[in-house]
Amino acid sequence: MCGEEGFVMLHVIEDSLMDSVRLIPFLFLTYLAMEYLEHRAGKGMQKWIKGADRAAPVMGGLLGAVPQCGFSAAAANLYAGRVISLGTLLAIFLSTSDEMLPVLISERVPVGTVLGIVLAKAAFGVAAGLAVDFMLRKKGGERQKGISDICTQERCRCEKGIIPAALNHTLRIFLFILLVSFGLNLLLHYAGEEALAKLILNKPVIGPILSGLVGLIPNCAGSVAITRLYLEGAMGLGAAMAGLLAGSGVGLLVLFRVNHNRRENVKIMLLLYGIGVGAGIVMGMFWR
């Protein structure tokens, strides 16, 4: 029995490695393009956001969807200095793709599906950002502009060169994908393919609620796990969108470091989670 179990485990490990290794070239090329974009256009994007005034949530939602390193971290710094509004911060946090886009591209998901997910995130981000800023203006809560150019570790780690940074991202995401693939393959072996469809993450309301919690994890693990689970059929589009909207990469982590108003940070986190879960539940009613 032990020999049989060992053979099964080796088979699961082999399948997981094969599923993950084939993604490395696609991941590396995607991250190479993202790093190039970051180095060439990152500063200009931040300037546009700063000068956009009331249209800033629109700019933030659209630019946040552009794949690049550390934009949500930069937005947290800008908000801590009150250079951008709360609505703009939320628009960027909601629209940023973190590691979702590289995983989708590496899995060669149809372009229409990828664009649909990215545009949906951007649309929710823009709508939520405009609504929040409008309500704050109605209450008379105008923000005061300041200067905050805090260079955090998360924000600066991409400044070591395009190729080393791309290799670093590729290795880290490969390891996350390998772990998730191993878990899914193990589940499929012992429970069968039907187990994925019966997971609680596929439920109409509880799925988005749990996925949103996973999305709040302040690193790339959350978005990698959610994207892989969606691609494997372990969760529906609504649940996946809830987690992907709530996920802002290291943005929340940086916000808690640089913005000293802890109560405000908690409120922002809860608002981000609530919007993500609400949007996921709505999407789950119309799309599967």
Image (tube, grey):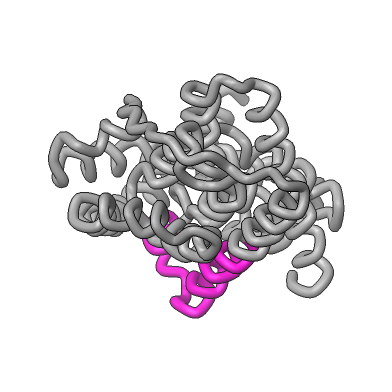
> Is 48 displayed left or right of 212 in the figure?
left
- Nearest the camera: 107 or 114? 114
Q: Position of residue 13 (x, y in %)?
A: 45, 37
Task: Name which residue lies at 43% across and 36% down.
Answer: 146
Q: Position of residue 77 (x, y in %)?
A: 43, 34
Q: Is residue 123 magenta?
A: yes
Q: Is residue 100 above or below residue 209?
A: below
Main secondary structure along the magenta-highlighted residues? helix
> Is 190 displayed left or right of 61 in the figure?
right
Q: Position of residue 54 (x, y in %)?
A: 55, 61
Task: Name which residue lies at 83% across and 69% down.
Answer: 285
Q: Is residue 112 above or below residue 114?
A: below
Q: Quadrant of residue 184?
A: top right
Q: Quadrant of residue 214?
A: top right
Q: Quadrant of the N terminus?
A: top right
- Nearest the camera: 238 or 118? 118
Q: Quadrant of the C terminus?
A: bottom right
Q: Is residue 172 above or below residue 32?
A: above
Q: Is residue 220 visible?
A: no
- Nearest the camera: 119 or 225? 119
Q: Is residue 156 visible?
A: yes
Q: Position of residue 18 (x, y in %)?
A: 37, 49
Q: Is residue 35 above or below residue 254?
A: below
Task: Name which residue lies at 49% across and 73% down.
Answer: 115
Chain part drawn in magenta: 101-124
The tally of labels here is 0
Q: Is residue 287 magenta?
A: no
- Nearest the camera: 226 or 87? 87
